[in-house]
Each structure stands twice: as structure tokens, then as C-alpha cells.
Image (cartoon, rainbow, N blue to C red):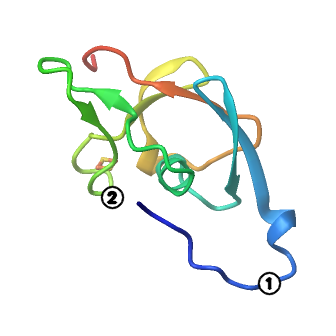
Amino acid sequence: MFRRIDRKTTLNDACDVTFVWEGVTLIGKAGDTVAAALLAAGVNHTRAHPVTGEPRTAYCMMGVCFECLVAIDGIPNRQACQTRLRDGMRVDLQRGARK
Ligand code: FES
């Protein structure tokens, strides 16, 4: 389980970013990548392996492994670790193999 390092600033609430994961509204922080926001929110399954069906999620967090693929605003095959979180962003499970 991941958790944030608490920075103890009074500006934390101003840095909140609201996004939707699989129809559920979650809160991330400004500057987060999508992968970081999902892990901090306790989401540990962002796609299924296309052959075995095993749950997968972000691994390297630097754009190398492609384990973090998700659909963002309806567009599949987006690397969550390489995409900055935006307010109102809709993020869904990656379904099927990437193309
Ligand atoms: S976590 Fe490895 S490419 Fe995104």
C-alpha cells in the first residue's frame, strides 16, 4: 500500500484535483501523474493481462514497462505514469491488449 508523505502545508486543500476512476470520484494532488494519484488512492489494478487476465498496475513509474496503461477521457493505451492528472479527468481500466 502506498501513502503520501505529508508536507504539512496550509495550501494542501488548494492543491486537490478531482478525477473519476471507473465512475468513482477520487482526489489527487496537483502535479501528480495519473499513476501516482491512483496508487495514493489505493487503486492497485489498472488493467488485466491480455493473455492470463491477471491484474496489473504501474511498476516502473518512468515510462519503460507499459504496465500502467489506462483509458483517459475515453482514449485507451495511455501511460498513467507519463500523464499529468487534470481536474475532471476520466480514467478507466485498460481493457484488452494495447494496439
Ligand atoms: S509504470 Fe512503467 S511505463 Fe508506466
- Report the side of 27 relative to 77 (left or right): right
Residue positioned 74% across, 85% down in the render: 8
Label 2 environment density (alpha carbons within 10 Å; few <14, some 14–19, many ≥20): few
Image location of residue 71, percent across then percent down:
48, 25
Image location of residue 82, percent across then percent down:
44, 49
Identity of the amino acid at label 1? Answer: Thr
Distance, label 1 to label 2, CA atoms, is 27 Å
Mark 1 residue element:
loop
- Report the side of 79 relative to 90 (left or right): left
Image location of residue 30, percent across then percent down:
71, 60
Quarter holding the N terminus is bottom left
User: CB under 8 Å between callouts 1 and 2?
Assistant: no
Q: Which image quadrant is residue 53 in?
A: top left
Q: Which image quadrant is residue 26 in?
A: top right
Identity of the amino acid at label 2? Answer: Met
**Residue holding disc 2:** 62
Which one is nearer the viewer's eye here, 29 or 78? 29
Mark 2 residue element:
loop
Q: Which image quadrant is residue 12 in?
A: bottom right
